[in-house]
Structure formats: structure tokens, C-alpha cells
Amino acid sequence: MKRLTSVIVTAALFLMALPALASTSVITTGEVNLRTGPGLDYASIGVVPKGTELVYLNESSIDDRGVAWYKISYGSSYSWVSSRYATLSNGEESVEKKEKTSRSGGTLWATAAVNIRSGPGVSYNTVGVLEEGASARYVGNDSYDAAETAWFQIETDEVSGWVSSAYVTFTEKKAPREEPEEEATVSGAFVSITGSRTNLRSGPGVVYSELTTMEEGDTAVYLDNYATDEYETIWYNVSYGDYTGWVSSRYAVLD
């Protein structure tokens, strides 16, 4: 362990000594893994401590949890760091921080019925429900749970608490679907990918293995089955080419 720590520190010092190859640097805000790709599924090739300055290669990516990753110079190659533990140093902020600071208050609407909880996570007690299409006052606070899902603090006329960002929007009011239960169980319906890309997984959750990647606009046959994971995200069971698996409703819709 002592030898590994020495290697990690040496790597961190080497990175800090690199010449500036870009006009922007990435500063770590906590101890963070350097990964081979933009996501938690990629292998860690080292760890750098809080306060390390890394050379930003002017490229970022959003993973299937909605978290931004920065591409940085690492030795003679490159690596990726999560924006949850790093920030751009030229005055710009990470994608998540930009969203947070632009939401000093206002109104949000539920895109599906969502539990209002006493704290920012599914482990907290349910204190109410915000029905699909209903609005609430956003009080300007947000937090991230263990799955890196954002939670927003809200107030209604009856209760105050936290709601998952997976089921609310700040942009426009979503009218309730007339027959949501029927839509969710329609046999032979299709599922369309709305995100730029998302993983088709072997089970209904991010802990399951990836079978393949689906791109925006791709469609799959809905197998008349869905499940909700521990973070209250709905997953659709679909058939896609030679694969049968599950896709998150955060990046897909039923047609």
C-alpha cells in the first residue's frame, strides 16, 4: 500500500509539472480516480489528490447518469475525471455547477408522479407525492445521492422536501398522460432512445452489465415489462437486434 501511495503521489506531481497544452486546466476538488473512459464503468489507472491541476484537452462527455467527465492529459496519453470531483479553472464551471447556479429559485413540474422525501435520496422518508403535471416551488438547493442523481429541494402549499431530478423539469409543464398505466403495459409498443447514447443492460439498473450501446433515435421492441430500481428510475425490458435487455426511462420513451 505504501508503494502504491508513492506511485500515486509521483504520478500526481508529474501531472502537475506538465506544460500547459490547453488554455484551460482541471482542478480536482477531492481525491479522484483517473479513468480510461468517461464513466464509472471504465478502469481506474490512478488516483490524484484534491487540489491537483490537470491539463484539460478541451473535450467532455456525459455518462448514463448525467454526470460530466473531463478529458485530461495523463503522461504520454490521456485520462478522464468526473466533474463531481473536479472543476475547470478558467472561470468556467462544470456542467452540473452551471445548472445549479442558474437555478436560484423558481418553479418545477413533475414529468411523472414522484415521491417528496424528507432528504435528498430514496433512503429518506416519503412526506408526500407530487403528481404528474403538478408544480412546486424550487427553493434553490440541490444535492447528489450515491448514484450521482441530483435531488431538488421544493415547497408546495402542503409540504416541503426533496424530489429526484429524474422526474421533474424546469422548462415547461408536462400535461399528464391520459392513460399512463395502459401506456406502460401496451404489448408490441416500441421504445425510442432520446439521449445522445445509452447502455442496454442485462438487468433493470446501472449495476447490471452492459450488453451494447444504443444511439439517439434508435428503437427497440418493448416486451411488455418494466421495473423500478432502488433510485426510483423506471427501466424498460426491450428486444434490440440480437439482444434482450433493459434501458433506462431517463433516456428512452414509449412510442
Image (cartoon, grey):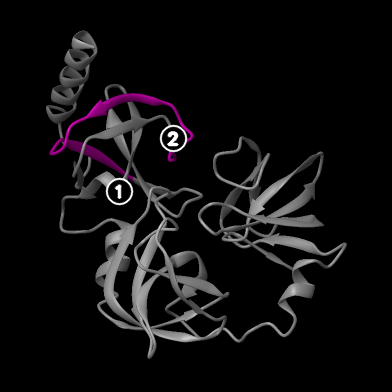
Q: Is residue 121 visible?
A: yes
Secondary structure found at label 2: loop
Q: Position of residue 68 (x, y in %)?
A: 38, 51
Q: Position of residue 109 (x, y in %)?
A: 47, 81
Decide which of 2, 64 is in the foreground and name it.
2
In the picture shown, does residue 21 fall above or below 92? above
Secondary structure found at label 1: helix
Q: Which image quarter is the N terminus in? A: top left
> Residue 106: within the magenta?
no
In the picture shown, does residue 249 fall above or below 137? above
Q: Is residue 178 left or right of residue 163?
A: right
Q: Position of residue 160 (x, y in %)?
A: 34, 79
Label drawn at residue 37: 2
Q: Residue at 51% of width from left, 70% of height from top?
A: 167
Lower position in the chain sequence, tag 1 or tag 2:
2
> Residue 54: within the magenta?
yes
Instruction: Report the number of numbered marks.
Output: 2
Residue situated furthest top in the rendering: 3
Write the start and end of the magenta stretch as one range.
Answer: 38-58
Q: Position of residue 58 (x, y in %)?
A: 31, 46
Q: Which residue is mark 1?
A: 84
Quarter occupied by residue 25 = top left
Quarter occupied by residue 82 = top left
Q: Residue at 49% of width from left, 71% of height from top?
A: 115
Q: Is residue 198 left or right of residue 55?
A: right
